[in-house]
Image (spheres, rainbow, N blue to C red):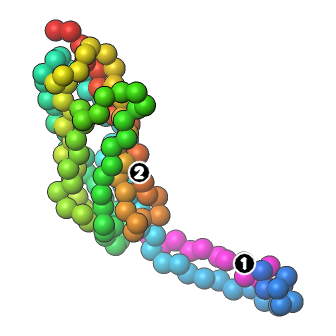
Amino acid sequence: MKTRLIVSVCTLLFYMLGFTGCSEVLLGDNKRIEVSSEALSYNLTSSQVQSDTLDVNSGSTRQVERLFTTIIYAEGQPEGWLSAELNQSRTPAEIVIDAKSNGLAPGSYTAELRVSSNDAVNSPVKIEVTLDVVIP
C-alpha cells in the first residue's frame, strides 16, 4: 500500500519568497517492521530454557533490510537470561528467542526486545518480555 504525503510547500515558500502555489509530493512505499507478537511471557522453574520463534515481515510490498535486535533489561535486574537471534537481516525473517532461568533467583524479570532497521519508518518495534522464575 502506497502512502501519500502531501507536503504543504506553499506555507513555507509564502513566508520565505512570497510564493502562493502548493505542491504534492509522493514519498512512496513506507517500509514498516511487523512482528508476530507484541509481548512474550515465560513461567520457568530453575535451570529451564524455553524457546519461541517470532515472524518478522514488512508492512509494504518491499523488503525491510538491515534488521537487527537489541535487548534492554529492566534497571537493576540481571542480564543474560534472554537471547534473540535473527535468521537473516531482511524480511521475511524469524527471530529465535530463548529465555533461560539458569542462575536466577525466584521472582519476576522483565526486558524489552527491540527489532530495528534504519530502513523502516516505525523502528524500533518493541516487544515486552516477562520471565517468572518459580520454585518447583
Query: Which residue is pictured at 47% across the width and 64% down the height?
Result: 121
**Is residue 112 located in the magenta-colored stretch of the structure?**
no
Q: Label 1, label 2: how many angstroms apart (C-alpha)?
A: 29 Å
User: Hey, which quadrant is residue 34 in on the image?
Assistant: bottom left
- Which residue bears the numbered disc 1? 8
Considering only vertical position in the picture, is 3 above or below 124?
below
Query: Which residue is pictured at 26% across the width and 26% down the height?
Result: 42
Disc 1 crowd rating (10 Å Cα; few below 14, some 14-19, many 20+) is few
Q: Assign the N terminus to one quadrant of the image.
A: bottom left
Query: Which residue is pictured at 35% across the width and 52% down the height?
Result: 115
User: Tag 2 or tag 1, which sits nearer the N-term?
Assistant: 1
Give the extent of the magenta segment.
1-11
**Disc 1 residue type?**
Ser
Camera-nearest residue between 34 and 78: 78
Considering only vertical position in the picture, is 29 above or below 128?
below
Q: Which mark is residue 131?
A: none
Helix, strand or loop for disc 1: loop
User: Hey, which quadrant is residue 116 in on the image?
Assistant: bottom left
Q: Which mark is residue 125?
A: 2
Query: How many marks overall?
Result: 2
Disc 2 crowd rating (10 Å Cα; few below 14, some 14-19, many 20+) is some
Q: Measured from the top left, where is residue 119 in percent x and y? A: 39, 68
Decide if residue 35 is in sight here.
no
Type of secondary structure dominating the magenta stretch? loop
**Disc 2 residue type?**
Val
Indicate which label's residue lies in the foreground, 1 or 2: 2
